[in-house]
Amino acid sequence: MTQVERQGWDVVVVGAGGAGLRAAIEAREQGMRTAVICKSLFGKAHTVMAEGGIAASMGNVNEGDNWKVHFRDTMRGGKFLNHWRMAELHAREAPDRVWELETWGALFDRTPDGRISQRNFGGHEYPRLAHVGDRTGLELIRTLQQKIVSLQQEDEREFGTYDARLKVFQECTVTRILKEHSLKQDGRVAGAFCYERESGRFFVLEAPAVVLATGGIGKSFKVTSNSWEYTGDGHALALLAGAPLVNMEFVQFHPTGMVWPPSVKGILVTESVRGDGGVLRNSDGKRFMFDYVPDVFKEKYAQSEDEGDRWYEDPDNNRRPPELLPRDEVARAINSEVKAGRGSPHGGVFLDVSTRMPAEVIRRRLPSMHHQFKELADVDITAEAMEVGPTCHYVMGGVDVDPDTAAAAGVPGLFAAGEVAGGMHGSNRLGGNSLSDLLVFGRRAGLYAAEYAAALVSGERPAVDPREIEAAEAEALRPFSAEGADPLHTGGPAENPYTLHQELQQAMNDLVGIIRRQPEMEQALDKLADLRVRARRAGVEGHRQYNPGWHLSIDLRNMLLVSECVARAALERRESRGGHTRDDHPEMDRRWRRVNLLCRLATNDGRPGLPEDPALAHIRLERRETPAIRADLLELFERDELAKYLTDEELSS
Amino acid sequence: MSSYDAHFRVWRGDAAGGSLGDFTVEVNEGEVVLDIIHRLQATQAPDLAVRWNCKAGKCGSCSAEINGRPRLMCMTRMSVFDRAETVTVTPMRAFPVVRDLVTDVSFNYAKAREVPSFVPPADLKPGEYRMRQEDVGRSQEFRKCIECFLCQDTCHVVRDHEENKEAFAGPRFLMRVAELDMHPLDAASEVGLDRKSTAQDDHGLGYCNITKCCTEVCPENIRITDNALIPLKERAADRKYDPLIWLGKTIRRRRSG
């Protein structure tokens, strides 16, 4: 084995989207030397694709708003499976996180009196989303990026080098979290094993605290709004380090993705289209959402088109239109309409703003959508309806974390924030709650990671077990010698990693997608086992310098692990709730609200690591009772509403 | 529209050199150039290096030159080409090649660090910022920038003049100076920083002779030259040559001297 370069830091942040950058800023401001490592160029993370806005109850547009209303909406959106403490912290702290961005140079759209403007969104009782047209994510990422540059400029003045206390390792990938004892389950975090995409060079970042902020898993599905980075890296890194994942059965299918042309299928159409007045129609021209308001939301949504239309002007005396139900409800409704033969020519439904707003207003409020449809689909949204359908958008499940500190359960020194963390959104996330989640919990993860690292005096810092480095290097190099490398499992020719990826995406889309059935999920698990066996033979051509085939072969391990989590948890949960819909168990069951499903690596001997035989299950499930919601938070709801979600036993206690 | 086979020429190589490779590849309805590059990866050239992310024109990663014109591969529809036409894809010319279509864009990150950051007003706490929409609109246009660096690639000041890179920040970062200068609450002047003169003195605004090449290639349709660079030039010129400002400066200097 060659000697791998090692560098020492206090805190390492994996991922440079909203959560990762916010965590890095916090850790650095706490005085910790902080390294950020990201797969793309700095400033390109998936956060740039967020469109609609950041949910924060500033009350700039409707004074009735406050954190309690936001908390209520979040719990309702997640069908009460949310970790109540995360939902509480999120609702309380979001306004401060937004205002702070202004002090770093962000320029949000304004109200007439000069404050931050806020827009309506699905599931939010009041206009709540701070926004910049429909490119809010870009503003968020650029503001955080520029804040990091300003901190680096401070360091340059003080130390003569920009990277003294905050460095971004761009276009690098982490393949393993390294610990102090490879043989013990409870070892502390000691660093991360990384490769540079440009050169293929390996290196180790040694640090007692690692923050995972890697985003989601959407690239395991065929139709998705997610970018190539979303291969579940952080989810898999946490599992491999010994931490459990929670709520992995809940995957959000955004109701409105583009459906045509095929090459752009899945690209997001922002919910702001509906928040600003856009309506959904089927091929009969009917606003079908009025037929799909579920009982739990009956009192809160308009019963007629007239009432829904009046709400935009007079929200105090009218109820909101059902196009603004939470995303899971709208996605299922679209799916049903298409299935019933009332879809659009290319298998979606119609989303129309052209008859609802003047062309000039559409161009001002929805500039990216106007541009996107014009450039990619030859559709002018100011003159005709868009065709839209559900697309895999977000995973509610993620690393099981402490709600206050973002520390991963059971692995000292490991933290997680943003999409890779689980619990905050329960079974379904409201639009706009993601960007605020990134900021609130990104900051918390950075803060507590810094505290944890600072508390260890230098002699007490965990040292990386050299065997962990050797194993990580061998694992990363396997695709170059795939065929014949492992005499036990060479049952066929080398596999093309792109083909394996396509088969995985097709299987997850078809068998563990928006509507789920037991036999199909069982079939998916068989397919995943087959793909794991074949992935051992995934081979690549060429060398290590910027080789996308090699990168994909490494990412496949992660996608296969998280896909198995989704499929196993979805098979186990015999009810329908939020982003998990069972054709064979269509009702929500209050008893299941008390259950969290945890996914852990299935190892036979208690040691962290993957099973030797790829055909064996890699994930085992554990049930855990959800924590009881604090009494004063329960009092924010009417008893009648609680009775829809909580068991009689819970209500009486 | 049915599928057809297109002829592609794609530059392959690294810092040591390379050449155009010929490929015949299937094209389907509605596809963009990036789809075709991905198909090449999946079927003919698994190690073909290309940088990309969102595939929706929002992240600015997949910049390249298509038939010699700087463009985003994800926003270039195949339908704009004649079916018989050969489509040539090469890396951005102004930056060093890493491999195939991937270039070393670190020049841009270095320049970004040289622009002094936003200076928050000392007397306002978070939540107290008040700005009118018409006042933030100008800077918001510049903040639409997705940092694809196509303007940096096409700008003739550096495109074939490596020697100018040291002194010239390029359109993207001159626009950043303009953005901060027009920010309604930027307090740079209170801490003695005159953004207008830094554009001229530190970031090479004088090299720009407003040929508008940057504006032409901008995928976000930002009017870089008209709305950022020309106003910045006018302001910089005002500061330098306006007799009143000159007089004011001279008097202040005398008093302090």
Image (spheres, helix red, strand yellow):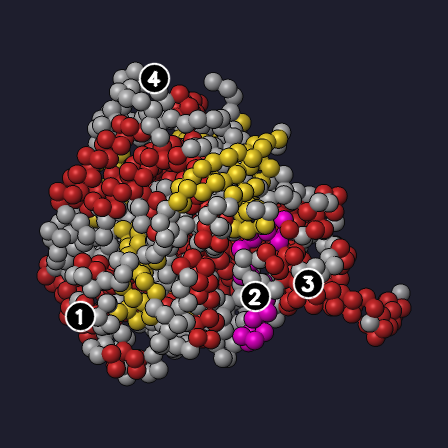
On the image, the x and y values in percent for residue A417 come to: 39, 49
Q: Do circles 4 and 1 both sit on a common chain?
A: yes
- Which residue is at a point 33% across and 35% down the rendered structure image? A499
Q: CA distance from mark 2 to mark 1?
A: 41 Å
Helix, strand or loop for disc 4: loop
Q: Is residue B141 magenta?
A: yes
Query: Which quadrant does the C terminus of chain B fall into?
Result: bottom right
Q: Do we see residue A227 in this rendering?
A: yes
- Which residue is at a point 34% across and 51% down the rendered structure image? A262
In the rendered image, which residue does mark 1 sit on?
Answer: A291
In the picture provided, is A642 more to the left or to the right than A358? left
Q: CA distance from mark 4 to mark 3?
A: 60 Å
In the rendered image, which residue does mark 4 sit on?
Answer: A484
Q: CA distance from mark 4 to mark 2?
A: 56 Å
In the rendered image, which residue does mark 2 sit on?
Answer: B141
Helix, strand or loop for disc 1: helix
Q: CA distance from mark 1 to mark 3?
A: 54 Å
Residue type at mark 1? Asp
Magenta residues, start to end: B131-153
Residue type at mark 2? Glu
Q: Do circles 1 and 3 both sit on a common chain?
A: no
Subunit of mark 3? B
Q: CA distance from mark 3 to mark 2?
A: 13 Å
Tell me if mark 2 has few (under 14), some (14-19) or many (20+) residues whose alpha carbon lies within 10 angstroms of its own.
some
Q: Do circles 3 and 2 both sit on a common chain?
A: yes
In the rendered image, which residue does mark 3 sit on?
Answer: B229
On the image, the x and y values in percent for residue A414 come to: 39, 40
